[in-house]
Amino acid sequence: MKINAKISLLLGTVSIILAYQLHPVFYKGFFYHSTAFAFCCFLYSLYQQVRGEWSLVVFSIYALSINNLIDEIFFDPKEMDWNEWISFALIILIVLQKKNKWKI
């Protein structure tokens, strides 16, 4: 396992523990921000480990989790805004551009 994946797993674990244990103490959106960050960390470590055709699937899910984190922090997560459509288009473009790298 790569060092980056181990650090990412550790950060995700700490973040999810803090989210569940300390969400009454911190600000209103702390739970959602922390869990979104934890899922980004977990999926990043998974993406570092996966090779072959599954890397395309894991990359897509990882990119969607980054969109979820950005949506939780900067936008209104209860509404479908332009940032979801823009990130969806970017993910599709990146996947189409990089599909030869992933040998699919």
Image (cartoon, grey):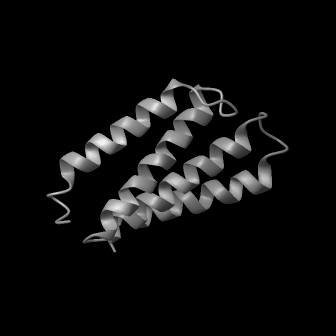
The one nearer the camera, 69 or 93, is 93
- Which residue lies at the image location 73% right of the left edge and 45% below the top edge? 31
Residue 66 spot, x, y in % from top left: 47, 44
The C terminus - image quarter: bottom left
Res. 44 image quadrant: bottom left
Inspect this view and state whether residue 76 appears.
Answer: yes
User: Is the residue 37 above or below the residue 72 in the image?
Assistant: below
Q: In this view, does 41 lie to the left or right of 27?
A: left
Residue 99 spot, x, y in % from top left: 20, 56
The N terminus - image quarter: bottom left
Residue 13 spot, x, y in % from top left: 59, 62
Q: Is residue 74 left or right of residue 86?
A: right
- Which residue lies at the image location 38% right of the left edge and 62% below the top edge? 57
The one nearer the camera, 76 or 27, is 76
- Total numbered labels placed on residues in the image: 0
Which residue sits furthest bottom? 1
User: Is the residue 77 above or below the residue 44 in the image?
Assistant: above
Res. 15 image quadrant: bottom right
Res. 14 image quadrant: bottom right
